[in-house]
Image (tube, rainbow, N blue to C red):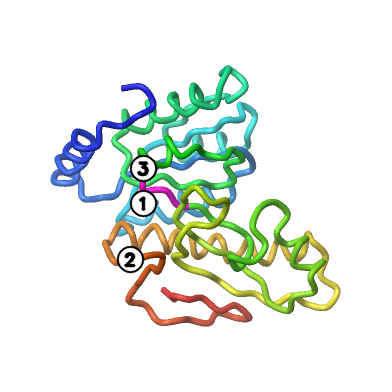
Amino acid sequence: MGGRIRGEEHARALRDHRAVNPKLRVAVLVSGHGSNLQALIDACAAPQYPAEIVLVISNVPTAYAIQRATAAGVAVKVIDHHSFATREQFETALLHELTGARVDLVCLAGFMRVLSPIFLKGFRGQILNIHPSLLPAFPGLHAPRQALLHGVKITGCTVHFVDEATDGGPILVQAAVPVLPGDTEATLADRIHLEEHRIYPMAVRWIASRLVATEGRRTIVEAKPAVSGLSLFNPGS
């Protein structure tokens, strides 16, 4: 199959599987601590949650996220990018595992590799990422640090679909948090992470429940904004 997915065969296999098991099959790609992976694992543990994690792939053999997945009984595959001569070879290995697991949705959770257009074409509209800012503000690395340096009063996190632009895909849901006097990069990041753990499972649930529509770059979910403590979610739960 190489680095390309046979789209019709893949779609047919997914339809056949969903006819037997209606839960969305999710793979999570990780590189580090895996706190967002844990949030997804916890959500999937609820019997009525409409998705299941069928595979976790780490490109870092020592990532703590591997222990989280193992403890939850989730299948884990380590694909060390250093073991491949080219990015194409590494991504071919990723695609092989994902297609073999009949994955419906790929969630990036602290996955520190840029995916090529060839990979993205294979899962077009089926890859989510979470970023610690209110995109399109502060894409890339160290978003909480960027927020503090710019003196913004509100920042937050964003779940978005992945496309060729870095942190530039269509936005699905955002959570806004205040930047408080005396905040450091660490304290602000901690406040943002709490909301990441809320909105990522929310976004996966919407997709699994087929509640997400798209109009160009806009995504539409029938859910009103919601407030929890100092945080604002749009859409809400």
Instruction: Say if the magenta span includes residue 125.
Output: yes
Instruction: Say if the magenta span includes residue 182.
Output: no
* Quadrant assignment for the N terminus: top left
* Label 3 Cα neighbours within 10 Å, binned few <14 / some 14-19 / many ≥20: many
Estimate the spatial distance between the alpha carbons at disc 1 and disc 3, rounded to whole Å: 6 Å
Residue at screen point 31% across, 44% down:
104
Label 2 sits on what residue type?
Thr
Provide residue 65's location: percent of width, then percent of height.
Answer: 58, 39
Is residue 177 toward the left or the right of residue 188 in the image?
Answer: left
Estimate the spatial distance between the alpha carbons at disc 2 and disc 3, rounded to whole Å: 16 Å
Provide residue 205's location: percent of width, then percent of height.
Answer: 36, 60
- First to last magenta residue range: 123-128
Which of marks 1 and 2 precedes in the sequence? 1
Estimate the spatial distance between the alpha carbons at disc 2 and disc 1, rounded to whole Å: 10 Å
Which of marks 3 and 2 precedes in the sequence? 3
State the mark number for residue 112: none
Label 1 sits on what residue type?
Gly
State the mark number for residue 123: 3
95 and 193: which one is in front?
Answer: 95
**The quarter of the displayed image where residue 3 is located:** top left
Circles 1 and 3: CB atoms closer than 8 Å: yes
Label 3 sits on what residue type?
Phe
Residue at screen point 25% across, 31% down:
6
Residue 17 position (above or below residue 219): above
Residue at screen point 37% across, 33% down:
98
- Describe the element under mark 1 as helix, strand or loop: loop
The residue beneath circle 1 is 125
Provide residue 174's location: percent of width, then percent of height.
Answer: 52, 69
Circles 2 and 1: CB atoms closer than 8 Å: yes
